[in-house]
Image (cartoon, helix red, strand yellow):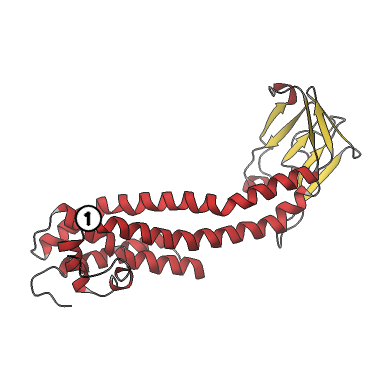
C-alpha cells in the first residue's frame, strides 16, 4: 500500500528518502496518475501565460494590421478594392520601426519584393516573401518570393473581404487560442514525461550498481519519473520569471543528482 499521496510527492520529491523507497516498493501504476497531475498543473499555468502574451501581441500588432485591410472582392480570378491603388498596409511591433506588411496594387505595377513588403497583391494574384527576417533586415540577398494566381483557386465565384470580416475571423480564432495551446502543450509534455524516463531508467540501473542495490527496470523507471520533478518545477518557475541560460543542461544535471538520490535512498540503512 502506498505511504505517500500523489500530491505530496510533488514537494517530497525534493528531500524525502522515504518517498523514493515507497515509490520503488508500492507505486507501480500510480506514477501514471502522478504524471498526468504534474502535466495538467504545468500546462494550465504555461498555456495561460503564453496565451496572455499572444493576446497582447494580437492587441498591439495584429489588430492594427487587420484594421487596415481594404474592402474588396475577387470575382472570377480578378481582385478589385474600393480604396485607391496602390494601397499599403503597415505593421509595427513594440519599440520597433514601422514596416510594410502588404501592398494592394490593382494596376499590377508594384514589383515583387518592393519596399520589403511581406505580401504584394495584384489584380490577378499575389506574391509572398519567404525571406527570413534576419536576411531581410541585412538586405544581403534579393527577396525570395512565391507567387499565386487567383485563377488557381478551385472556387471561381465571388469572394468579398474587408477589415471587419478579417477582425471577426481573428476574434473567433482568439477564443480557441488558450484551449488549443493547452491541448498541444499537454500532449507534448505527456510524451516527454513518459518517454524521457525510458533512457533515465538505464542510468538509474547504473546508479544501482554503483551503490550495490538490485533494481528492476520498472523500479528504475518509476524512480526516474519522480526524481525528475524537482528539476522540472525549478526550471519551469525560473523560465516563467527570468531567462535561464542552457535550461536543458541545467535540468539534466539536476535530474541526475536527484535520480542518484532516489536510488541511494533505497540502499539498506541509507541516510543522507
Mark 1, secondary structure of its residue: helix
Kindly indicate the quadrant of the structure image that contains residue 17: bottom left
Kindly indicate the quadrant of the structure image that contains residue 24: bottom left
Asked whether 38 or 133 is in front, the reply is 38
Can residue 91 be seen in the rendering of this structure?
no
Residue 229: horizontal and vertical position, in percent?
A: 33, 65
Q: Quadrant of the C terminus?
A: bottom left
Can residue 226 be seen in the rendering of this structure?
yes
217 lies above or below 231: above
Q: Residue at left 80%, top 40%? A: 103
Q: Residue furthest right?
A: 84
Q: Quadrant of the N terminus?
A: bottom left
Please tell me how crowded label 1 is: few (under 14), some (14-19), or many (20+) other residues with Cα within 10 Å: many
The number of numbered discs placed on residues in the rendered structure image is 1
12 with respect to 49 (left or right): left
201 lies above or below 235: above
Q: Residue at left 76%, top 49%? A: 65
Residue marked by disc 1 = 221
267 with respect to 29 (left or right): left
Residue 238: horizontal and vertical position, in percent?
A: 45, 69
Asked whether 212 or 22 is in front, the reply is 22
Q: Residue furthest bottom?
A: 272
Q: Residue at left 71%, top 52%? A: 62
79 with respect to 190 (left or right): right
Residue 69: horizontal and vertical position, in percent?
A: 80, 44
Q: Residue at left 22%, top 55%? A: 221
133 lies above or below 51: above
Residue 35: horizontal and vertical position, in percent?
A: 33, 58
Asked whether 241 or 194 is in front, the reply is 194
Q: Residue furthest front?
A: 1
Amino acid at each position: 500500500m502506498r505511504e505517500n499521496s500523489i500530491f505530496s510527492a510533488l514537494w517530497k520529491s525534493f528531500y524525502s528518502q522515504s518517498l523514493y523507497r515507497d515509490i520503488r516498493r508500492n507505486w507501480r501504476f500510480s506514477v501514471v496518475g502522478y504524471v498526468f497531475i504534474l502535466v495538467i498543473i504545468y500546462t494550465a499555468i504555461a498555456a495561460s501565460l503564453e496565451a496572455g502574451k499572444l493576446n497582447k501581441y494580437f492587441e498591439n500588432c495584429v489588430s492594427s494590421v487587420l484594421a487596415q485591410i481594404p474592402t474588396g472582392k475577387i470575382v472570377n480570378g480578378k481582385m478589385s478594392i474600393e480604396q485607391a491603388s496602390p494601397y499599403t498596409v503597415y505593421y509595427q511591433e513594440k519599440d520597433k520601426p514601422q514596416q510594410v506588411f502588404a501592398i494592394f496594387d490593382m494596376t499590377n505595377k508594384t514589383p515583387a519584393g518592393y519596399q520589403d513588403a511581406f505580401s504584394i497583391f495584384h489584380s490577378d494574384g499575389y506574391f509572398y516573401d519567404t525571406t527570413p527576417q534576419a536576411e531581410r533586415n541585412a538586405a544581403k540577398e534579393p527577396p525570395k518570393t512565391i507567387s499565386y494566381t487567383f485563377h488557381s483557386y478551385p472556387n471561381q465565384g465571388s469572394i468579398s473581404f474587408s477589415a471587419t470580416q478579417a477582425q471577426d475571423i481573428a476574434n473567433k480564432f482568439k477564443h480557441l487560442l488558450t484551449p488549443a495551446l493547452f491541448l498541444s502543450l499537454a500532449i507534448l509534455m505527456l510524451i516527454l514525461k513518459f518517454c524521457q524516463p525510458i533512457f533515465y531508467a538505464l542510468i538509474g540501473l547504473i546508479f544501482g550498481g554503483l551503490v550495490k542495490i538490485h533494481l528492476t527496470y520498472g523500479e528504475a523507471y518509476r524512480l526516474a519519473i519522480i526524481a525528475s520533478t524537482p528539476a522540472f518545477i525549478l526550471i519551469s518557475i525560473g523560465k516563467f520569471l527570468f531567462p535561464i541560460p542552457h535550461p536543458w543542461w541545467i535540468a539534466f544535471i539536476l535530474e541526475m543528482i536527484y535520480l542518484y538520490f532516489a536510488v541511494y535512498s533505497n540502499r539498506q540503512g541509507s541516510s543522507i
